[in-house]
Image (cartoon, rainbow, N blue to C red):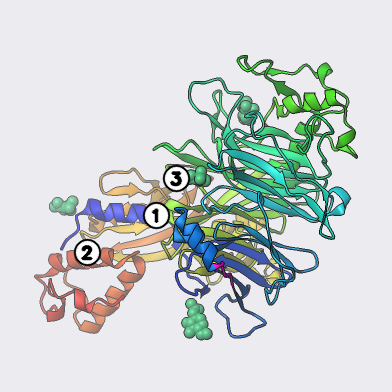
Amino acid sequence: MWWPPFLLLILIVTTGTASLLQPDNIFSAGRIEYRKLLVDAKSASLYVGARDHIFRLWIYNVNDTSSESLYTDRELKGDPEETAECERSGNSPSECASWLRLLFVQSDGSLLACTTQAMRPHIAKLDALTMRDREIPQSIIGVCSPHHNLNTTAVFVEFGNPDGLPTIYSGIRTGLSLENHLIYRPPLVFNNKEVHSSMRTIYTDSKWLNEPQFVGSYEVGQYVYFFFRELAVEFENCGRTVYSRVARICKNDLGGKNVLRQVFTSYVKARLNCSISSQFPFYFDHIQSVYKVASESDTFFYASFSTADSPFVASAVCHFSLNNINRLFDTGLFSEQPSVTSAWIQTPPEQVPNNRPGQCVSDSRHTSDADLHFAKSHLLMVDSVPGGEPIIHQRDVQFSTILVDKIDNKHVIFVYVPSRSEILKIAHWRESGSSVKSFHLSNLKLPFSDKVFDISLLSNEYLFVADEARVSQYRVSQCEAHYDCRRCAFDPYCSWNIARAMCFTKEAIHSTAVGWIPDANSADRCSSQAKSTDVKIYPGDATHLRCNSEASSWTFEKEPIEQNERLISTVGGGLVLMNATVTDSGVYRCQASDGTPIVEYRLIVDGENCAQPRTLDQFRSVQREWCKKYDNYKESLSKWQNWHERNSHCPRVPEQFKAGKLNSNVVI
Ligand SMILES: *[C@@H]1O[C@H](CO)[C@@H](O)[C@H](O)[C@H]1NC(C)=O
Ligand SMILES: *[C@@H]1O[C@H](CO)[C@@H](O)[C@H](O)[C@H]1NC(C)=O
Ligand SMILES: *[C@@H]1O[C@H](CO)[C@@H](O)[C@H](O)[C@H]1NC(C)=O
Ligand SMILES: *[C@@H]1O[C@H](CO)[C@@H](O)[C@H](O)[C@H]1NC(C)=O
């Protein structure tokens, strides 16, 4: 079977420049949908929620379940009667099982868990080691959703609430047909006594929340922040336009006395602007995931976005400064809609009361009715929060989960792309002055194709991926994925060894030791470090010269390469040579846009027709070489077949390698 060149080309191009991840460890207790992960670095635990179970795993090896100090399996038992009742009301057995929805670590080391038991959520306080109940679980509404496909969010806030009572804030949907969208705080309880009643946003007013999809929530200082996308009320259009938002409320909010009773009086929100700037900016309006990173002077929210779910979806990553968000809420202009049918306008600043909406006051119940009436209809800011130029944007893909690690003042962003089962790895940092730089380091391909539910990060150590069948553990560094010096030097986890021309996990000693290029500052020294590789092929063969750099160009014997039907560059920056001839032999060099060499290949097209290996061992050895070079056995097989057909006139080809007998001999 000889695969035509165009097919080979498609195989090569679509396998792109992703490098396949090898899990360091895997945990599985059956195919029970590992849906929720929580990393607790302090106790070196990874908590995992799956169908009818919560597991505590050892964070440095999730496969080590040998001792009680490293591993706990807490079974979540639903009442059989209630489970049957749940299924009788038309819910699936999966929905009626017990699932961990929310899990928080409290400062005393105990866990706060919200679990669904036959769709009757309960909140429980668990011992962090044994995971036994510390208190009798209480049934609770509005905090965690009984439905697992809803995009809800929640944050546990231990300090700063009225009377210092810990509580959860949630962004959730309730009601018989899930028609109510709200941000909610359950009653504050002390010694089993309700001290303050529950608080919420107004769910009957689309100005407050208009069919939102929540993606995240965080507490910082005296505020709680919610990130979501929703139908834009302010955009006059016949279609349904979605905008992304950040909203803020004060932790100490107690609601109004007459107006806004039991309703957050401090709720304000603004649009998140993630766009490619131009005369007509191109907006990514659907936030998908958000991650918080604190630094000395500011806190940043990195978020993944996509365009509307259309066949032409595109995605981007932007980042938002907390200082910018707060400045906008504290000093920006409010917008208002004078009547239901009129357009939205900017509220004249002189009409804003001294007691500005969004400010925290010592007791909101003392705020005047007039000020509360104003706050009720003035909660949307005119301006949007700038997300900067997208750190990365791509066509035809939907980004989902985003995670960010902080290493030596650099941020490493991981973005999950479900359709390709890939995790993009991007370095992002601020240079002296204020210029922001980023570098797309690699695409890491997950080895399993099961649906991924959650991804979690242990800083400078591991990524954990929870899917339908398992939890798998990967090192964040993955330095061996870097073939070239620059990429390695720009990766904060790695440093380049000059003598061995290889990328290794960074160790402190590398910054002072001779022979290492440890960081981006010394990446200039990479220019003399282009890795040179010998590639030997035969006439008629195709080969893929990888470069792993999108902004690059190729030279052949120092002359720029022009593409033709035999010489094609790939999406990932590589070069494919088809139907090689002896005259294609020579030095191919891939260089960065500034001319810095990245990789170099010395290609030899061996035209000595029959000077090929003759013995079985020699054939196997050549074949192994090919298998190494090619992504999958199909490619190497077709290549082998191709070569075989061309050389079948050569004498003494061992019988086993005649066409049709190849499959049983393939050593992969
Ligand atoms: C997990 O550990 C067991 C022994 O404890 C071992 O047999 C197995 O291969 C390990 N699996 C992985 C994926 O590491
Ligand atoms: C939740 O969000 C995802 C994309 O982020 C979307 O595909 C899905 O439909 C949403 N779920 C619901 C129930 O709306
Ligand atoms: C969003 O940001 C872009 C680029 O900075 C800017 O041109 C545009 O006006 C902003 N749009 C909104 C609605 O603020
Ligand atoms: C490969 O090149 C040879 C001569 O250079 C030509 O005869 C042949 O048709 C080419 N094959 C393909 C598949 O393009």
Task: Tell me the residue at 67%/69% (across/down).
Answer: 510
**Mark 1, mark 3: which one is toward the viewer?**
3
Establish if 341 lies above or below 223: above
Q: Which residue is mark 3?
A: 397
Image coords of residue 536 (percent x, y): 31, 66
Q: Is residue 112 left or right of residue 397?
A: right
Image coords of residue 294 (percent x, y): 74, 52
**Mark 3, mark 2: which one is toward the viewer?**
3
Residue 488 seen in render: no
Residue 125 seen in render: yes
Image coords of residue 336 (percent x, y): 70, 20
* Quarter residue 564 falls in: top left
Establish if 111 lies above or below 328: below
Task: Tell me the residue at 25%/76% (across/down).
Answer: 666
Give, as a single range, the part of the protein colored magenta.
75-79
Mark 1–mark 2 CB contact (< 8 Å): no
Q: Viewer-proximal residue, 480 or 664?
A: 664
Mark 1–mark 3 CB contact (< 8 Å): no
The amino acid at mark 2 is: Ser
CA–CA distance between discs 1 and 2? 19 Å
Q: Is residue 595 left or right of residue 382?
A: left
Q: Viewer-proximal residue, 567 or 140?
A: 140
Q: Which residue is mark 1?
A: 16
* Quadrant in the picture for the N terminus: bottom left
Q: Which residue is mark 2?
A: 638
Q: Is residue 202 left or right of residue 310?
A: right
| Helix, strand or loop for the magenta stretch, by majority | loop
Task: Tell me the residue at 56%/20% (across/down).
Answer: 236
Q: Which numbered marker is on residue 103?
A: none
The amino acid at mark 3 is: Val
Establish if 494 lies above or below 588: below
